[in-house]
Image: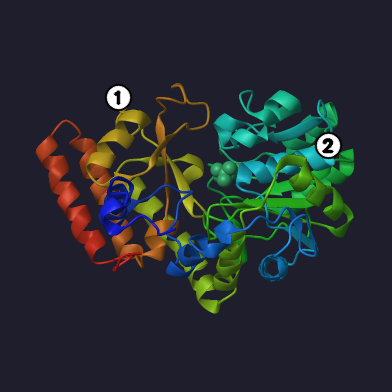
Amino acid sequence: MPWPSETQRDTEVFGLIDKERERQNTGLQLIASENFTSPDVMEATGSVLTNKYAEGYPGKRYYGGNAVVDDIEALAIERVKKLFGAEHANVQPHSGASANMAVYLGLIKPGDTVLGLSLDHGGHLTHGSPVNASGILYNFQSFRVGATDERLDFDQIRDLAIKHKPKMIVAGTTSYPRRLEPQPFRAIADEVGALMMFDIAHIAGLVAGGAHPNPVPYADVVTFTTHKTLRGPRGGCILTTAAHAAAIDKAVFPGSQGGPLEHAVAAKAVAFHEAMQPSFKDYAQQIVKNASALAEALSKQGFRLVSGGTDTHMMVVDLQPFDAELTGKESQLVLDEAGITLNKNNIPNDPRSPFVTSGVRIGTPAVTTQGMKEPEMALIAEYIATTLRNRNNPAAVAEVRAKVAALCAKFPVYPKRA
Ligand SMILES: *Cc1c(COP(=O)(O)O)cnc(C)c1O
């Protein structure tokens, strides 16, 4: 059977992909959980591996024809274990959420108590949101950041751990700009006899590149996404000690997934290879330097940084001191008009709802991949402030849009068709 000919090609979808490529190439991508993957990662993602069924694990598959796939998955496992110094790895989770659900399924029982960071203080949906399976199936209790310093308060976490006696403590965040030291979590987990899970979805690339402490030596289980700072394909991964290896593997397959996405597993292997190169250390350091530079430039423009700044790839910006009327929702919309893409975000103890918010979250992984450095961060802060100050002046916003496009043209991500 021939493939559909050129004349029958789905020009609708490919036309839209071209439009999206254009959007990514001509605007500033400041969503803290996004990045640009390498052409090699994309090539693996779009490879013939998408055709293969491989339920099971290397050497133990339910289907034939998996000799090559076994080699690919084994390579991904070997590389990620080396990259993070882990005893065991499962590279099959389809996403970060799937990885987290598999950990809960494998290591605790429905109804068990778990302690995690409150969502509106920087925790993730899968850390016990009432609308997420984690919050529906397990009894999540939350800790919050300190009222004055907006940082994790280990005295509070310890008190809650003693009070609630959780089976598991979940460390890890989705919008918290500071370093997360693993040792205090380990000490509290040991004191109350809890397992310790560390979700490094956002910071996996910083950990791999040596720009953030590695929790693997301290945690029972570490989960992450491969598509954020780690700069791989969309997907998840679980690292564990040998003691929990069998339970985790069983919880991923057959516990919560069917056939693995081996094209994504191959692309993860490519990303792990890239993250092992010396240049990735430079990349991780530059992400953090850029975030610091951007945070400083934004505070000079009159914004307040939650917790006073950042040690990572991201910052949460409190808009209230800049303009008490301005919401995160409106900022996100008008900045999009100016070609600056970021997301609204609650600040700790936000008076506004999660759909409106008083803050925005900004991250530097993608612009750092493009090659931007500190001087460009100062420009970005200026463009953000100018757009927000002139949010009711379309001509001024269009002027920023042109400047943003000119800046991005100097840092092409995918010069040719990717
Ligand atoms: C992004 C994120 C996840 C979920 O990842 P998905 O791939 O979107 O399911 C889980 N935990 C944390 C902390 C995250 O930031």
Q: Secondary structure at mark 2?
A: loop
Q: Residue furthest bottom?
A: 278
Name the side, left or right, on which 19 lies relative to 263. left
Residue 27 visible in the shown view: no
Q: Are marks 1 and 2 in contact (CB under 8 Å)?
A: no
* Residue displayed at 70% across by 35% down: 116
Name the side, left or right, on which 97 lies relative to 408. right
Report the disc number at residue 108. 2
Q: Position of residue 182 (x, y in %)?
A: 72, 52
Report the disc number at residue 325. 1
**Cα distance, mark 1 to mark 2?**
45 Å
Q: Position of residue 362 (x, y in %)?
A: 41, 46
In front of the other: 391 or 129: 129
Neighbours of disc 1 within 10 Å: few (<14), some (14-19), many (20+): few
Neighbours of disc 2 within 10 Å: few (<14), some (14-19), many (20+): some
The mark nearer the N terminus, 1 or 2, is 2
